[in-house]
């Protein structure tokens, strides 16, 4: 955290930015390894650093309207890692989700009252929207995406090809969340879709907001898989 106080005017190397990237990668790797003890240490730190990094980028640019894709990149990383936390919890029976929820619950608690929570949800939704411009975190998030694909293949959730066609009665994993994501891996959904669908838009403050199409699509896929569980 102390590195965030160093000036960002080019007089110093960007130690904070480099440390942030390493921390984000280590957070994802902890999920793949199933290392709950390490994850509970690094994710809360990354959570704070992501918002600090966004604030630094905004200050450096001086205008929230300029370079918005770049400025919001750290929180977009955080949204993806939050989604992966929910996914790997369901995949391997781990407790990453509790850490993810606790950090976000605390964030919302500090915005309680008035339009704060709803405005935060709307902002996070905007950050998660796809962009034609590549941001600084795009390479990291691509690595995480393919790392997740390898993890699912290694556990037999998907086959050798990038997309696997399943019979309706086939049960490759008992958790609906895993099946809902894996069915359309690399085709339709990203990790942040999991987080927005299963946490952000489940919050009561989101009741008055219109869900983006991507979230509605994941909701429908998740509901279908839950129904499959009920009928099994």
Image: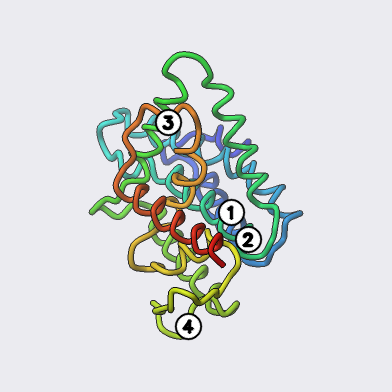
Between 62 and 42, the one lying in front of the other is 42
Q: Which residue is mark 3?
A: 206
Q: Outermost residue toward the top?
A: 114
| N-term mark: 4 or 3 | 4
Marks 2 and 3 close (CB-CB < 8 Å): no
Crowding at dot 3, Cα within 10 Å, few <14 / some 14-19 / many 20+, comes out as some
* Farthest left residue in view: 132
SS for dot 1: helix
Q: Do the CB atoms of the residues marked 1 and 2 lie less than 8 Å apart? A: yes
From this view, report whether residue 76 is shown above or below residue 110: below
Q: Position of residue 80 (x, y in %)?
A: 47, 52
**SS of the residue at dot 4?**
loop
Position of 47 with respect to 193 (left or right) is right
Dot in front, 2 or 3: 3
> How far is mark 1 from mark 4, CA to CA?
22 Å
User: Which callout, 1 or 3, points to the residue nearer the camera?
Assistant: 3
* Pointer 4 residue: 159
Q: Which residue is mark 1?
A: 85
Earlier along the polypeptide chain: callout 1 or callout 4? 1
Q: Residues within 10 Å of mark 4 (few under 14, many from 20)?
A: few
Residue 1: percent from left, percent from top: 62, 37
Q: Residue 22, located in which quarter of the rendered image?
A: bottom right
Give whichever of 200, 149 is nearer the camera: 200
Give the mark nearer the N terminus: 1 vs 3. 1
């Amino acid at each position: 955290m102390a590195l965030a106080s160093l000036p960002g005017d080019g007089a110093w190397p960007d130690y904070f930015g480099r440390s942030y990237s390493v921390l984000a990668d280590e957070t994802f790797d902890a999920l793949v390894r199933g290392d709950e003890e390490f994850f509970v240490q690094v994710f809360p730190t990354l959570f704070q650093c992501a918002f600090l990094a966004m604030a630094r980028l905004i200050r450096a640019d001086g205008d929230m309207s300029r370079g918005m894709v770049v400025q919001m990149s750290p929180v977009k990383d955080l949204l993806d890692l939050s989604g992966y936390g929910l996914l790997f919890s369901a995949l391997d029976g781990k407790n990453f989700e509790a850490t993810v929820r606790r950090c976000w619950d605390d964030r919302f608690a500090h915005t309680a009252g008035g339009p704060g929570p709803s405005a935060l949800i709307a902002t996070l939704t905007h950050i998660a929207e796809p962009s034609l411009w590549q941001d600084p975190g795009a390479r990291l998030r691509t690595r995480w995406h393919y790392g997740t694909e390898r993890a699912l293949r290694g556990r037999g959730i998907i086959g050798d090809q990038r997309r696997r066609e399943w019979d309706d009665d086939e049960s490759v994993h008992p958790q609906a969340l895993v099946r809902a994501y894996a069915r359309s891996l690399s085709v339709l959904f990203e990790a942040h879709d999991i987080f927005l669908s299963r946490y952000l838009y489940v919050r009561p403050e989101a009741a008055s907001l219109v869900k983006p199409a991507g979230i509605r699509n994941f909701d429908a896929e998740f509901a279908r898989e839950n129904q499959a569980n009920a009928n099994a």
